[in-house]
Structure formats: structure tokens, C-alpha cells
Amino acid sequence: MCKRKTVKCNTQHIIDYLEDTLSADERRSFEALLDNSPELQQELKDIRFIRESFAELSFHRRIDSTKNWTELSKKIAIDKYKRKLRYFIRNAAAILVIPLIITTAVLYRAVINGENIPAGQIEITSANGLVTKMTLPDGTEVWLNSGSKLSYPQYFTGDTRSVSLSGEAYFKVEADQANRFEVLTSDGTTVNAYGTEFNVCAYEDDPTVEATLISGNIEVGIPSVKHEKPGLINIPVGQQVLYDKDNGEYEIANVNLAVKTSWKDGKMIFRRANMTEITRRLARHFNVDMCLDGGELYNYEYSATFTTETLEEILYLLEKSAPIQCEILYPERSEDYTYTRKTVLISMKK
């Protein structure tokens, strides 16, 4: 108990007060003495400080510094790759195409828990009906057409800047005479450049591969040429290499550059295009299936430029230009709750 005459208390009594183990009467007596004794107040403050300091020291001793440093390092690594992801997304801007929609390409995966942080290839896919623009690690600008896929490393190393393409892409290559830029397609065709602009069309389901030179110089490597050994082909500006994957033959021809590259600016330009080419391009841009019913349809050719027109508007214009009729079959829900694809049937007018 506390002694009122000397204004002192037993240390254990003070500890019991701090731990709230005194009875109600003992607590009231202690607090009454505490109110009238600055000496007791100071002793209480000292003992409280010692207890708090000891508790903090015990807490720090229980900390596993090695484990905490490992966790902190992992968080720092994750934050680093999140910043890179945000920078990448800012450079992967989607472009307006037919129909006018905006998309983000995204398709760079980072493991959230910090394990297996990607350090190899980045793969970008442009959804059907959309065009995606991106900037590669060396500064090269790429426009990726509808339904196309581009794979490239996080960092270019060695003397070759190599990327893989499935689909169609327009390349504006950053000039670097010491390090060749190389595009590889799924069939084995290669396009080499050091600093130029060119277009490559290499969809896996197309029978041909096209490489069109807009400016500068490129070398096209064909995997197999009928009656010839594979080699590199140089083409002049404004011309195109057209390689037939089925028979192994190729040809070089003058082309209308606006027709071949306008897709990257959200346009569709046709110049004396047959119905097969038209339906193929419309199907990709609008993400629909298109069916031609009747051999006579293949004889019609069209010249037109489309920018903001909808699929329905384009089909209406086609019907006005030739004796054809177009029927749109809209998606329907199946019994398994999946939906059919939107389909356009084109046939001769009866």
C-alpha cells in the first residue's frame, strides 16, 4: 500500500495500477494520493516509460529481419514491373477503325505475387475489328491490324532486333545501321531492314504473304521458292513481294500504297477489288463471318473508300453498285448459353 506521510508507494503497487489489477477502493486511494504528489507522478511516469521501452525492445527482438528484407525486396521488384507496365500501356494506344471503337492491347502479363516476374517475350494481340499502335524498346513504331499478334523481347540484345508477326503490321523502323531489324512470320518468311517503313501482311489462314516497301530499303527472305534456292529479295519503293505459300512461287509488282496501308489510319480503300478481297477485309475489321453464295459474285470489282461507315452502310452501298443482296444473321444464344457469330450472307438478287 501507499504511505501518505512519505508520499511514496511500493513499486509493485504502481505496476499493479498500470496493469489495472488493483481493486476499485485501492485504485481510488492511489489516484487520490497521485493527485497530491508530484513525486509519485514522476515515479509513475518513469516506470511507465521503462515498461513501454522494454515492450518495444521485446517487439524488435521478435522481428525476423532477414524474412522482412526478403518480403520488402519482393515488393520493390513488383512495384518496378508495375511502373514498366503503366509505361507500356501509355505507349500502346488503340486507334479508331471501322467501326469506331477504342481498345487497349494488352497483353503483357506480370505475376502479382512477385514470383516468376517476366523477363522474356512480350506478346501483343490486336482484337478483331481494332487496330493497335505501340512503340518497341528501340523506338520503332508499329501499327498492328485487326486479329494480328506481335511478339518481341523486353530488350533487344545482340546485333539483330527480331520480332515475330502473325497477321498484318505496319513498321516505322528506328534507324540503326549496326543492328538489323527483322520480322519473322509463322510460315518462315523474313523481312530485314535497318531504318525504313514497310507493311507486312502474313495472316496464318491467308494463302499468301505480302511485304510492301513504303520508304528506304528492305530484304525479303522467302522460305522456299519453286525451282530456286531460298534467298533474299530486294524490292524498290512502292513495290510489293507477294509470296504464295501453297506453290512456293513469288512475284514483285507495283502497288497502290494508299490501298495497302490506309488501314492503319482507320480507312478501307478498295481499287478494283474483287468480292473475295472485300469480304475478307470486311470480315476482319468488323469481326463477322461472311459467306458468298454463287460463283457469279467473284466477277464483280469495286472501287471505294470507307472511313466511318458502319457494316450495314457498307453493305447497302455494295447492293447499290451490283445486283447482289446482303442478309445479316445476328448472334443467337445457344442451349449452352454461348452465342453464334454475326454472319453476313451475300448472294445474287433473284
Image (cartoon, helix red, strand yellow):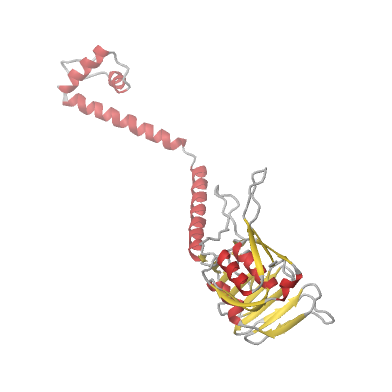
Q: Is residue 239 left or right of residue 2?
A: right
Q: Residue at x 72, y 69 (%)?
A: 206
Q: In the rendered image of this protein, does residue 175 appear above or below residue 105?
A: below
Q: Give the mark count.
A: 0
Say which of 105 and 312 sits in front.
Answer: 312
Q: Determine if residue 311 is in view.
A: yes
Say which of 284 and 236 sits in front.
Answer: 284
Q: Is residue 86 left or right of residue 299?
A: left
Q: Residue at x 17, y 15 (%)?
A: 4
- Which quadrant of the rendered structure holds the N terminus? top left
Say which of 179 and 174 sits in front.
Answer: 174
Q: In the rendered image of this protein, does residue 311 appear above or below residue 28?
A: below
Q: Is residue 273 left or right of residue 268?
A: right
Q: Determine if residue 164 is in view.
A: no
Image quadrant where residue 117 sits: bottom right
Identity of the residue furthest to the right in this view: 227
Question: Where residue 15 appears, x then y in whole percent?
Answer: 31, 22
Question: Where residue 123 appears, x then y in whole percent?
Answer: 61, 61
Question: Where residue 336 appears, x then y in whole percent?
Answer: 67, 43
